[in-house]
Image (cartoon, rainbow, N blue to C red):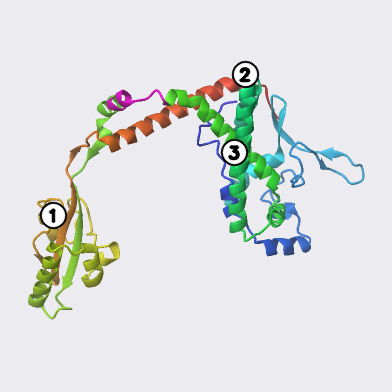
């Protein structure tokens, strides 16, 4: 089975699920009291997919198929080295995406749903492949067993934070209220917990596996990338500037506006804050931008009469008054960026190093995962 999973792709957001909770605690209790079932609220209800398993059951346990026979049935979507991936877990993983497409017309909706399910199942298989190998290796030594315990403990703490956030968004105070909301939607808190905690452990374990490769990167790698990709680090001539407009109409003519603008310039040269003066005295719209002028590049400056002066000023310099028929503009150059190659300063070095580390981490993640999958026994069920 081909995998396209990388470090970011494995993390299926459960905080997104919290944001998509459809009803509050009171509404959930009312719906349950009115006889609404989990399948009624689930995005699976109209798709013909398997009926959701009973929430809050052990993911490995079975849901009763018939109260008359007492037989149990679950739908297993895949197995990784004997570890089952159940339909409930797949539903938990794709719930936000299925909600997003629920109003799409057919047959587009069914096609998108199948694509989402296939992609999510592949991610879950990748996750179980990594966990299977991680658990096998860490259990071999006392030190590894301690690492595994700490990993599970950290995953639990992280999920506790997510639960608090979910309850806050859903206006709940207890876990039981949250469980009732999830039940109405065909979800289970235990299923979401399993999804998050196992994904968290995968991310941490794989980070440990790739860090030895990313830590090898240094200044030499940064310098080499910079020299070979200079097209990525070109700047264009630009200015960041400030502007106060003094209206001739408001000040009873251009002469009075000119005198008022000159007084403001004197205050600025004496140390008054430009943004504060703009907020109080600007008759245009720069006061809504903390005094910032419109436009940064040649041909974009508004009004265009200010442009020739701005590209002649030094950083921090106040320019001459720019007089128009409608009033006076007071301008100041905050910062000038000259066209050319960006210097390889500390900020750019850090940017390049981070980019290189992400590239190496993604490459090694995919390589390690591919090797793990080649060793694993993967069974997929229709």
Element assignment for label 2: helix
Q: CA distance from mark 2 to mark 3?
A: 28 Å
Element assignment for label 3: helix
CB atoms of marks 2 and 3 within 8 Å: no
Q: CA distance from mark 1 to mark 2?
A: 64 Å
Residue corresponding to mark 2: 375
User: Mark 2: few, some, or many residues within 10 Å (few <14, many ≥20)?
Assistant: few
Region in magenta = 215-223
Q: Considering depth in this image, is 81 or 118 the residue closer to the camera?
A: 81
Residue corresponding to mark 3: 154
User: Mark 3: few, some, or many residues within 10 Å (few <14, many ≥20)?
Assistant: some
Residue corresponding to mark 1: 310
Quarter of the picture containing the C terminus is top right
Residue name at image x 44 percent, y 23 percent: 213
Give percent across and percent down for residue 371: 56, 20
Q: Is residue 152 above or below residue 325?
A: above
Closer to the camera: disc 1 or disc 3?
Answer: 3
The quarter of the displayed image where residue 355 is located: top left
């Amino acid at each position: 089975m081909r995998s396209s999973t990388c470090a970011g792709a494995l993390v299926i957001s459960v905080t997104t699920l919290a944001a998509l909770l459809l009803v509050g605690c009171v509404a959930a209790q009312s719906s349950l009291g009115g006889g609404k079932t989990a399948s009624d609220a689930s995005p699976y209800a109209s798709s013909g997919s398997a009926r959701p398993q009973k929430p809050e059951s052990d993911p490995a346990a079975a849901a009763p198929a018939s109260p008359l026979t007492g037989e149990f049935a679950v739908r297993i979507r895949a197995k990784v080295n004997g570890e089952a991936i159940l339909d409930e877990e797949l539903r938990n993983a794709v719930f936000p995406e299925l909600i997003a497409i629920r109003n799409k017309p057919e047959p587009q909706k069914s096609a998108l749903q199948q694509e989402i399910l296939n992609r999510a199942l592949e991610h879950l298989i990748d996750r179980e492949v990594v966990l299977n190998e991680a658990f096998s290796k860490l259990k071999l030594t006392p030190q590894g067993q301690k690492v595994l315990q700490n990993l599970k403990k950290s995953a639990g703490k992280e999920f506790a934070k997510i639960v608090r956030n979910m309850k806050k968004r859903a206006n709940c105070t207890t876990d039981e209220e949250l469980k009732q909301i999830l039940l109405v939607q065909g979800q289970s808190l235990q299923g979401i917990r399993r999804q998050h905690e196992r994904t968290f452990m995968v991310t941490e374990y794989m980070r440990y596996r790739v860090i030895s490769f990313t830590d090898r990167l240094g200044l030499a790698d940064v310098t080499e990338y910079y020299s070979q990709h200079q097209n990525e680090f070109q700047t264009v001539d630009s200015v960041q500037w400030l502007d106060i407009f003094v209206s001739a109409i408001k000040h009873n003519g251009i002469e009075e506006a000119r005198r008022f603008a000159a007084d403001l310039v004197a205050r600025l040269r004496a140390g008054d804050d430009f943004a504060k003066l703009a907020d109080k005295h600007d008759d245009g719209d720069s006061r809504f931008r903390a005094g910032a002028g419109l436009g940064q590049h040649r041909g974009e400056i508004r009004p265009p009469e200010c442009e020739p002066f701005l590209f002649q000023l030094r950083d921090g310099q106040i320019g001459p008054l720019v007089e128009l028929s409608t009033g006076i503009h007071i301008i100041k150059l905050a910062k000038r960026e000259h066209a050319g190659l960006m210097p390889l300063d500390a900020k750019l070095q850090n940017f390049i190093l981070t980019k290189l580390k992400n590239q190496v981490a993604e490459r090694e993640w995919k390589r390690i995962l591919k090797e793990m999958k080649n060793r694993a026994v993967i069974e997929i069920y229709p």
